[in-house]
Every structure is written in structure tokens, then in C-alpha cells.
Image (cartoon, helix red, strand yellow):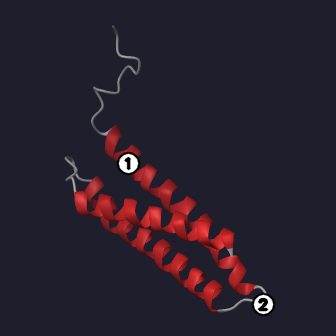
Amino acid sequence: MPDPTPGAATDPGAAPQRTRLAWRRTGLSAAAVALLSVRPAFSPGAGPPEWLAAAGAMICWAALVGIALHRAPGLRAPVPAVVPRSIRAYALITVALAALAGWVVML
């Protein structure tokens, strides 16, 4: 059976580029989630729960961007190194941001 994506296996340089783009997309979507999570903190009746949620969302977003910026130069190398700690941290922070956004919806 022929490969459904011709050229995918013959272009090893495309995988790091796709990975960088995926990290950027995740960072941009995390920015949108963080900004929507901060919105209730600016309402007139906002209190400590809303402020804590906003602070947590911004901290999570800043951590995601920091990890992505730290990881980006490694993906430009001819043979990118696998760094499982940063991948795991990125996944955990993304899940934490999603849980925080869900909590904000429940406020």
C-alpha cells in the first residue's frame, strides 16, 4: 500500500517546522483562553476568586510562552533534541489552563 502522504518520509526538515508551528498555535490559543479568563476580573462586582483566576490564567499563559520560546532554538537544529520535560510541562500547563478556564465559566 503506498504512503498516503508522499514526501512526508523523505523530508526530515519539515517535522521540526511543523512542531514549531504547533507550539505557536497552542500559545496563541492559550492567549485567547487566558484573555477570556481574565475578563470576569474587570467586572464591577469582581472579588478575590476572579482576581485569582485572572492571575492564574496569566501565569499559565506566560509559562507556556516561556517554554515555547526556550524550546524554539532547539527545534532549529539540524537534528532536534527531544526534551521530554518541556513537553510534559507544556502539556500539564495546558491542562491546568483549561481547568482554570472551566472554573471561570462556573463562577
Q: Which residue is mark 2?
A: 45
- Which of discs 1 and 2 lies nearer the camera? The answer is 2
Viewer-nearest residue: 83 or 97: 97
How many residues crowd mark 2 within 10 Å: few (<14), some (14–19), many (20+)? few
Which residue is painted at 34% across and 10% down in the image? Answer: 2
Residue 28 on image: x %, y %: 55, 61
Please say if the residues under marks 1 and 2 sit with CB atoms less than 8 Å apart: no
Q: Amino acid at mark 2?
A: Gly
Disc 2 on helix, strand or loop? loop
Alpha carbon distance from label 1 to label 2: 42 Å
Which residue is painted at 70% across and 77% down in the image? Answer: 39
Residue 101 on image: x %, y %: 59, 68
Residue 77 on image: x %, y %: 23, 53
Q: Is residue 71 left or right of residue 58?
A: left
Q: Which residue is mark 1?
A: 19
Viewer-nearest residue: 71 or 62: 62
Which residue is painted at 34% across and 27% down in the image? Answer: 8
Q: Amino acid at mark 1?
A: Thr
Residue 3: name its quadrant.
top left
Location of the C terminus (image quadrant): bottom right
Q: Is residue 36 left or right of residue 65?
A: right
Q: How many marks?
A: 2
How many residues crowd mark 1 within 10 Å: few (<14), some (14–19), many (20+)? few
- Mark 1 or 2, nearer chain start: 1
Q: Is residue 30 left or right of residue 47?
A: left
